[in-house]
Image: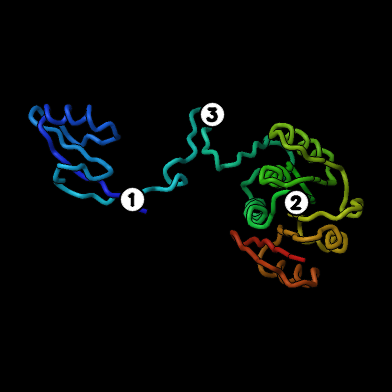
């Protein structure tokens, strides 16, 4: 998108007289003892412009970016911060599989959906889901330390999440969206339980290279809605 700047030049006296009458925004381009060169964003009646300039309007995403000042980070309103303590559990957002899941959650999650995060680690995927507008969010892990990290991080982010010490087989309800960032060995053991836990969309990751992906798709016995690759790792989306 572009807008037009109208460039004018007036003597100093005429300019400041014009300025008091104009009553709108303008941009002073240069000024010396005898004249002022300035630009308006619409034509001025009675004045002939020296030049017309086409100026690109930058979207807010390009013009306003996160700014760090020591231990403070100033963020645009459209960025959803997730605060994660560097603890013993997996999931700080640095690993490719975590980033894959975050991208796919943002793409497929719909507001109000219930979410189950299997193998939650720090809880980053559960927290992100809540910040994207999910309804009920449950995060499960078999590591007690991971469950404690999940609880801490959910409180830190003011996100209402159930962090449970549980396996997929312990969960007795279906969720709109399932996200499972696990290893292939775990998928081999748990796939039958995972497949019964979602009603609409499932996001799977933790699959390295095409060998893992091929075996996982055989285990899944379903046609993927999307496969996304990042740094040799794969994320797979299933829809019902």
Please state the horizontal and vertical placement of residue 152, each as a whole percent of the image.
75, 33
- The residue that mark 3 highlights is 72
Residue at 81 percent of width and 54 percent of height:
175
Please state the horizontal and vertical placement of residue 173, each as a whole percent of the image.
89, 53
Q: Is residue 188 left or right of residue 55?
A: right
Please state the horizontal and vertical placement of residue 196, each as a whole percent of the image.
86, 61
Q: Quadrant of residue 97?
A: bottom right
Structural distance between the alpha carbons of marks 3 and 1:
31 Å
Q: Secondary structure at mark 2?
A: loop
- Mark found first going from the N terminus, 2 or 3: 3
Q: Is residue 60 above or below residue 28?
A: below
Q: Count of labels shown?
A: 3
- Mark found first going from the N terminus, 1 or 2: 1
Residue at 66 percent of width and 51 percent of height:
98
Q: Nearer the viewer, mark 3 or mark 1?
A: 1
Please state the horizontal and vertical placement of residue 11, each as a whole percent of the image.
10, 32
Q: What crowding class fits label 2: few (fewer than 14 Cα within 10 Å), some (14-19), or many (20 or more)?
A: some
Q: What crowding class fits label 1: few (fewer than 14 Cα within 10 Å), some (14-19), or many (20 or more)?
A: few
Q: Quadrant of residue 184?
A: bottom right
The image's mark for residue 56 is: 1
Structural distance between the alpha carbons of marks 1 and 2:
39 Å
Residue at 66 percent of width and 43 percent of height:
92
- The residue that mark 2 highlights is 113
Q: Is residue 113 above or below residue 88?
A: below
């Amino acid at each position: 998108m572009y807008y037009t700047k109208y460039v004018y030049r007036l003597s100093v006296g005429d300019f400041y007289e014009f300025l008091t009458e104009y009553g709108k925004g303008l941009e002073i381009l240069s000024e010396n003892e005898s004249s002022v060169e300035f630009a308006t964003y619409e034509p001025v009646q009675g004045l002939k412009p020296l030049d017309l300039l086409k100026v690109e309007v930058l979207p807010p995403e390009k013009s306003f970016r996160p700014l760090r000042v020591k231990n403070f980070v100033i963020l645009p309103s459209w960025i959803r911060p997730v605060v994660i303590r560097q603890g013993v559990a997996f999931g700080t957002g640095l690993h490719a599989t975590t980033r894959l899941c975050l991208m796919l959650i943002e793409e497929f999650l719909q507001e109000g959906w219930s979410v189950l995060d299997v193998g939650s680690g720090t809880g980053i995927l559960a927290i992100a889901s809540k910040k994207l507008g999910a309804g009920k969010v449950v995060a499960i892990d078999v590591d007690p330390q991971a469950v404690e990290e999940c609880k801490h991080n959910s409180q830190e982010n003011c996100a209402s999440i159930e962090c449970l010490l549980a396996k997929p087989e312990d969960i007795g309800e279906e969720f709109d969206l399932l996200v499972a960032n696990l290893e292939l060995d775990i998928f081999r053991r748990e796939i039958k339980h995972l497949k019964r836990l979602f009603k609409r969309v499932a996001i799977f990751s933790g699959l390295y290279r095409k060998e893992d992906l091929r075996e996982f798709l055989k285990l899944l016995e379903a046609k993927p809605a999307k496969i996304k690759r990042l740094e040799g790792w794969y994320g797979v989306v299933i829809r019902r």
